[in-house]
Amino acid sequence: MPYQPSKEHLDNQIPDAFKTINGVLKDLQSSTGADERYISMMLDALAQEWENKSPSREGFGFR
């Protein structure tokens, strides 16, 4: 069954997770001097890794 986020997830947990991830990426960028292109490539590689591990093509509720 595809993931269906609850109102709590949509209102709080997901936005909080994105804020945390964004903060980590900004810290990485400032401490290493990585440019936005490099950060974008890292995120693309991570997304591809997660995509390859997905058990089904149904998505997880957002598609």
Image: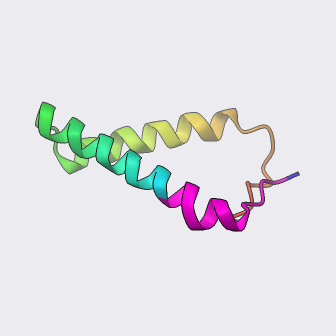
Q: Residue 32 vs residue 9: left or right?
A: left
Q: Residue 27 occupies which quadrant of the picture?
A: top left
Q: Which residues are magenta?
A: 2-15
Q: Where residue 18 sits: x, y (%)?
A: 45, 54
Q: Residue 54 vs residue 12: left or right?
A: right
Vertical placement of residue 61 versus 29, above or below: below
Vertical placement of residue 56 versus 8, above or below: above
- For the point 66% across and 63% down, the residue is 8
17 or 45: which is nearer to us?
17
Vertical placement of residue 29 versus 15, above or below: above
Q: Residue 56 vs residue 26: left or right?
A: right
- Magenta stretch: residue 62 in it? no
Identify the colour scheme used: rainbow
Q: Residue 42 occupies which quadrant of the picture?
A: top left
Q: Where residue 45 sits: x, y (%)?
A: 44, 37
2 or 44: which is nearer to us?
2
Main SS type for the magenta part?
helix
- For the point 55% across and 61% down, the residue is 12
- Magenta stretch: residue 13 in it? yes
9 or 49: which is nearer to us?
9
Q: Quadrant of the C terminus?
A: bottom right
Q: Where residue 43 sits: x, y (%)?
A: 40, 43
Q: Where residue 37 sits: x, y (%)?
A: 24, 48
